[in-house]
Amino acid sequence: MKIWLSVFVLFLSILPHQGQAAENEMPAVHVEEKAIEEVLNAFHEAAAKANLEAYFSHFAPDGVFIGTDADERWSVPAFKAYVAPHFAKGKGWTYKARERHISFHAGKGAVFAWFDELLDSASYGTARGSGVLLKVGKDWKIAQYNLSFPIPNDLAKGMTETIKAFEAKTAK
């Protein structure tokens, strides 16, 4: 009985510290989530303003941009070369985040986050962005950004048939 009482007392003495540690970890996650929100918002703002240097400053050096077309998988240098003439003419693109979800992982020396966001665009309506960010020093950098157009399930069959027909017609 004394052993069980000792274990119980030990458990009670540890319990407040465990709760305190969990509380101490939450602000760190909140701070990182806020930092990622700021990076993604600044990324979209730079695109809307056609600000080439600001836009690409948010990418990791070996980052990737996956566009809406099936053949659009761009390295940062290739995407920058494609975007530069458009931005030089003041032609950017505007996406505003309507909803965003962010998750984190830290382990084996790497800290990264992944996200998905519903976006509003005057040109395209609803779009979806998703991707991965890496913590590089004190900064979050986009390692992968994937832009897509979500298709409502009720329209998917017709849309995929249209895409198949287009691909068959344009096949080389």
Image (cartoon, grey):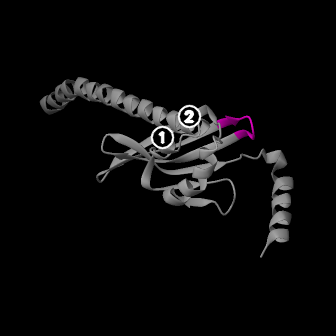
Check the image and name the residue furthest to the bottom.
172
Are the residues at dot 1 and dot 2 in contact (C-beta closer than 8 Å)?
yes
Q: Which residue is mark 1?
A: 54
Mark in the foreground, 1 or 2: 1
The picture places residue 78, in percent across and down from the top left corner, at: 54, 60
Q: CA distance from mark 1 to mark 2?
A: 9 Å
The picture places residue 107, in percent across and down from the top left corner, at: 32, 50
Query: Which labelled disc corresponds to residue 45?
Result: 2
Q: Magenta-highlighted stretch: main secondary structure?
A: strand
Q: Secondary structure at mark 2?
A: helix
| Residue nearest the viewer, comparing 129 with 108 | 129
| Residue nearest the viewer, comparing 91 with 19 | 91
Magenta region = 119-126
The picture places residue 95, in percent across and down from the top left corner, at: 64, 36
Residue at image coords 36%, 28%: 26
169 inside magenta stretch: no
Question: Which amino acid lies under the numbered mark 1 shown in the image of this protein?
Answer: Ala
Residue at image coords 57%, 46%: 130
Q: In the displayed structure, does residue 107 sit left or right of residue 49?
A: left
The quadrant holding residue 28 is top left
Position of the C terminus by quadrant: bottom right
Disc 2 crowd, CA 10 A, few/some/many (<14, 14-19, 20+): some
Disc 1 crowd, CA 10 A, few/some/many (<14, 14-19, 20+): some
